[in-house]
Amino acid sequence: MTITDAVTNGLTDRWKDAATPSTSTDWLERAQEVADILAVDAVERDRVGATPYAEVRLLKAAGLVTLLGPTAHGGAGETWETAYKVIRTVARGDGSIGQVLGYHYLWAWAARLVATEEQIAAVEELYTTNNYLFGGAVNPRDSDLVIREDGDDLVFSGHKSFSTGGQISDLTVLEGVLEGTDTHIFAIVPTAQDGIVFADDWDSLGQRLTESGSVQIRDVRVPWASAAGFVDRVFQPLIYNTLNVPAIQLVFANFYLGIAQGALETASAYTRSTTRPWPYGGDDKQHASEEWYLLEGYGTLQSKLWADEALLDAAGTEISAVLHAPREELSERRRGEIAVRIAAGKLRIVDDGLEVATRVYELTGARASANSVGLDIFWRNLRTHSLHDPIAYKKREVGEYVLLNDIPEPTWYT
């Protein structure tokens, strides 16, 4: 059953009368149900490239959008450790939707990262109660949005080349610089307003359903009182504020892992059902699954992904602990050590994931290159997003930690 059929035929109501998952394991099982639905027609939906409204309805119906939301407002109250695994699981079925969900979790946590306690409470009640999905217009490689003061309001204007979530989001995170200063300000605003205009111009090799095209911000007004983390128009800084980058870098690594796992699962199923044994090697087998070079190939690739999973899970445990700890407790050194561990995990899954997405063709055979099989979606998705920031710099960060005991300085990418 396709995602369109699932929505049309009420399959998303399957959870309406079901018990709400109560443990991390239960939530991962729910995520796997979603992934299974998405996987059925992931290739076809990728080729059509339509705005993924139905996919977002599926995420919402499954309860995954409010996974990190407070239980007091109907959320699951789960940890980031679980959220990372949920992202990975959904990405096995559809890498684009895994990315959308992962970015949502980061932006849903943005208030906790930088806002005041009162602002955090208001934002979390708003998005959890309404089952809202977040997007973000915060691409740091573009010029900052310009913010001007107008009485008790801030007015955001400018352009961003990428805004993942785009028009499928209910709320958008904006970031800009106050005119005449070097003061950066974050704010959360409703997406559906005249001042937010999406160009619908996302046209990439992969991750085609992430709604990551450009956006114009035209005089979007925000009360000064909603400027995240500001008290009497002065920002209250914490080291915790800088966790946004390590947190989202680990989001990246987990949906990369999910994409790679999806590639290996899809390829192995094809090999079992369709790949033919090679009859000219002098060691003829009745079934392709008995071929020694295929057994060796799948064994090598699976062992790499298991190792990557262990590394990413360890990093997820570490950052989850500090994300859920009192914000004032985080030290600069601890933050840096976690960033290095995440950099190591990311660089490994990029290298290993691309190897998996490429070598699966050798393990499935020439006929698996047919467009109808669709194995290319995994390589395209992983190749596209893994270019987000140069992996060479992640390798350097780890090397500087090993040789010089240096931790990375917080930037928009570290």
Image (cartoon, grey):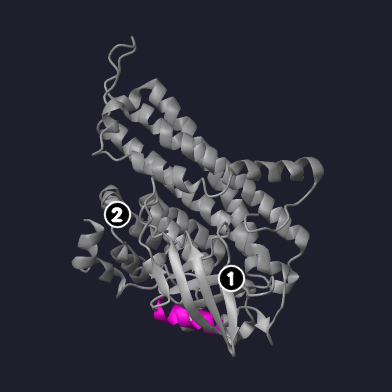
Can you tell which mark lies on residue 49? 2
Number of residues whose C-alpha sits closer than 10 Å to that of mark 1, classed few (under 14), some (14–19) or many (20 or more): many
Q: Position of residue 285 (x, y in %)?
A: 30, 18
Q: Quadrant of the N terminus?
A: bottom left
Q: Is residue 225 above or below residue 16?
A: below
Q: Position of residue 241 (x, y in %)?
A: 67, 69
Farthest-out residue, right: 404
Q: Is residue 414 above or below residue 297?
A: below
Residue occupying image coordinates x 64% and y 81%: 116
Residue 196 is drawn in which quadrant? bottom left
Answer yes or no: is residue 80 visible: yes
- Whether residue 338 sits left or right of residue 50 in the image: it is right
Q: Nearer the viewer, mark 1 or mark 2?
A: 1
- As shown in the figure, which amino acid type bears the numbered disc 2? Gly
Can you tell which mark lies on residue 176? 1
Q: Is residue 123 magenta?
A: yes
Please report the bounds of the magenta region as a residue range: 121-132
Q: Position of residue 280 (x, y in %)?
A: 30, 11
Number of residues whose C-alpha sits closer than 10 Å to that of mark 2, classed few (under 14), some (14–19) or many (20 or more): some
